[in-house]
Image: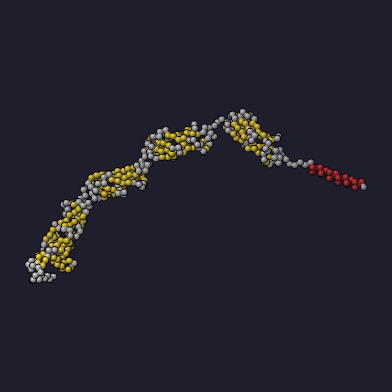
Amino acid sequence: MVKNLSLFIFIILSFTSCSKKAADTPLATVPERLELSPSSKTVLVGNTTNFTTSFFNNQGVAATVPTNVTWSSLNNSIATVNAQGLITGIAAGQTSITVTYNTISATALITVTSNTVSDRLEISSPTNSINAGTSTTFTLTYFNNMGNQAPVPSGVVWSSLNSGIANVNQQGVVSGITIGQTSIKATLNTIVANAVITVTANQERLEISPGNLNLSAGNTGTFTLTYFNSQGMQAPVPSGVVWSSMNTNMATVNQQGMVTGVAVGQTNILATLNALTASASVTISANNQLATITLLPNNILEINKTQFSTVTATGFTSNGTAIPGLAFTFNTSNNNLVSVLNNGIVQGIEYGTANVTATSASIFSPPLMVQVIRSGSFVNMGSVGIGKLKIENGDLKLQTSANFVVNPSTPDLRIYL
């Protein structure tokens, strides 16, 4: 009985001892804490900034920052902080900013400086030299008092120190007026930026070659046009060039630069492109160049067998002016029917038809038809008029004159071919 009681007491004591040990073991916890980052910051006088606040609970896990934290500055004459943690620089110096939650806090260093930079404008340009009559666009860049580039505020005013050399509009487009140098200014309140622009001569031009063209009246020649851009570099000729003659009674020109001599003299040919003009002269001399030859008679020459006649040749220029003193060579298409000498004397050799031509300087006249015929007047038998016998296209034909008549009385007139 005693033995069993001792065992019971032992079991109860053991259970009681185990229960007490389990209840006395605490959970694993760490102190709550606040952190500010970065550990230090700099702010300009009059500017604001803030720190980043982090809160860690008693499990060491980042959690939402409690709403009832409080902020304070060690020296409000250097920097102040509001209930939301926004810090304002008051005067140059250094102080600490503290955030507190219950019994925990975090502190960071704030440095206030007055080393501000002035707002500024900068002008940039693709070129600092332009030709008169051309333009370029200046670009404006704005930097705030932190030295950072920012959008250009409204209210900028552009101006030129000498608008007679170059002017500028309110979009920064600079136009060259005349040769020289001036300053372009951009003003924003009290901020000013300057840039220098040099205006040079516009080298854009046209040139005609040759400088002088010699032509005979009635003949043609062509001028060549060359274009140089504003930089003085040769470039393709732009469209829109207009050609003209200062005296169309002496020479004319088409829109391809082809000139035609009209009369003896000299005049200028112009090529115009907008405000550009090029000029070249053309000299027209008398045209003594043979262009055509005509023969007289110019229809048909009829001669009797063994009879002589004269054919006259005349040479003309392209504008129809007769050329004196030319030598001609005469030719016949059939020497058995018609002969011809170089002085133009033609003789009928045999009945038939042949062509006579004249040549000079490789120019041929149109052919003149020469017909060798029999001709005579009808006499007696009461008839009046002239009759001709000639061969045309291999046929023998009788041709009577317009005044041919026959007396109706006997004897009869009969003609046999």
Q: Give the image location of residue 307, x and y in percent.
A: 11, 62
Identify the residue at horizontal 15%, vertical 67% (top origin).
Answer: 397
Q: Position of residue 404 (x, y in %)?
A: 12, 65
Residue 281, by quadrant, is top left
- Compare residues 405 and 82 and report the one nearer the observer: 405
In this orientation, which residue lies closer to the viewer: 94 or 48? 48
**Quadrant of the snapshot with the C terminus:** bottom left
Q: Is residue 202 above or below residue 357?
A: above
**Residue placed farthest to the front in the image?**
409
Position of residue 324 measured from the top left corner of the image (x, y, whole percent): 16, 51
Q: Does residue 209 appear in this view?
A: no
Residue farthest to the left, as pictured: 380
Residue at (67% x, 35% y) in the render:
69
In the rendered structure, the answer to whether residue 22 lies left or right of residue 56 reads right
Q: Whole-percent x and y of residue 284?
A: 23, 47
Residue found at x 70% / y 40%: 57
Above or below: residue 293 compared with residue 24: below
Q: How many marks?
A: 0
Left or right: where 151 falls relative to 37: left
Q: Quadrant of residue 115?
A: top right
Q: Is residue 90 visible?
A: yes
Give the colour scheme of this rendering: secondary structure
Q: Is residue 18 above or below residue 68?
A: below
Residue toward you, 242 or 138: 242
Q: Residue at the far top: name it.
A: 77
- On the rendered structure, is 152 left or right of 339? right
Residue 15 placement, left or right of 157: right
